[in-house]
């Protein structure tokens, strides 16, 4: 937590963007903690919402791209984790609509990777994955 706070204090919104990007990939890091750290450090709520959302949306876009480009190779690696197996099962069961759950911890980021592997239409991916993640951050900011 102190490392996240230090990054936010030093780099402000750009630090929050980078942390949120990394947290949206398969690296275990909490963008929610970073968002709260930014708010505690005095970043205005609208700015914090913008930077966290931008970083996280770029991160899930990276996951999608990685899934599209690497396909089965990445899918095999995702299946090595419980969250990855759950993401694949949900995608097989609910198809592209599983992206509505991509805001969830543990399984959300693998869902965006699997969406790329399954070649979910990019426009649908952007609208769905971005909106649920931005809504999550908006709720966190609203209840801060």
Image (spheres, grey):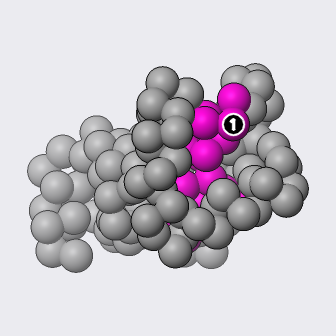
User: x%, y% of residue 95?
Assistant: 83, 48
Marker count (numbered):
1
User: x%, y% of residue 41?
Assistant: 28, 64
> Which residue is labeled 1 in the image?
118
Identified at 34% across, 66% down, the residue is 28
Q: In the visual, does 128 lie left or right of 14?
A: right
Q: Nearer the viewer, residue 49 or 66?
A: 66
Residue 117 covered by magenta stretch: yes
> What crowding class fits label 1: few (fewer than 14 Cα within 10 Å), some (14-19), or many (20 or more)?
many
User: x%, y% of residue 62?
Assistant: 45, 33
Query: Which structural element holds mark 1?
Result: loop
Identified at 45% across, 69% down, the residue is 81
Identified at 52% across, 74% down, the residue is 82
Q: Is residue 103 at least partly visible in the picture? A: no
Q: Which residues are magenta?
A: 101-119
Q: Within the image, what quadrant is residue 141 found in? A: bottom right
Query: Is the residue 2 above or below the residue 56 in the image?
Result: below
Q: Quadrant of the N terminus?
A: bottom left
User: x%, y% of residue 19?
Assistant: 31, 52
Residue 102 covered by magenta stretch: yes
Q: Quadrant of the C terminus?
A: bottom right
Q: Nearer the viewer, residue 133 or 139?
A: 133
Q: In the visual, does 4 lie left or right of 76?
A: left
Q: Is residue 86 at least partly visible in the picture? A: yes
Q: In the visual, does 95 lie left or right of 73?
A: right
Query: Is the residue 87 above or below the residue 64 in the image?
Result: below
Q: Within the image, what quadrant is residue 73 found in? A: top left
């Amino acid at each position: 937590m102190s490392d996240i706070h230090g990054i936010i204090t030093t780099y402000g919104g750009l630090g929050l963007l980078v942390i949120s990007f990394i947290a949206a990939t398969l690296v275990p890091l909490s963008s929610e903690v970073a968002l709260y750290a930014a708010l505690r450090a005095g970043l205005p709520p609208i700015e914090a919402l913008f930077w966290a959302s931008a970083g996280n949306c770029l991160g899930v876009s990276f996951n999608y791209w990685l899934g599209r480009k690497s396909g089965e190779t990445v899918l095999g690696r995702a299946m090595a984790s419980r969250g990855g197996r759950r993401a694949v099962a949900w995608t097989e069961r609910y198809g592209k609509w599983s992206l509505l759950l991509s805001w969830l911890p543990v399984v959300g980021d693998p869902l965006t990777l699997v969406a790329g592997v399954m070649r979910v239409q990019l426009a649908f991916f952007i609208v769905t994955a971005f909106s649920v993640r931005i809504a999550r951050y908006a709720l966190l900011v609203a209840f801060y």
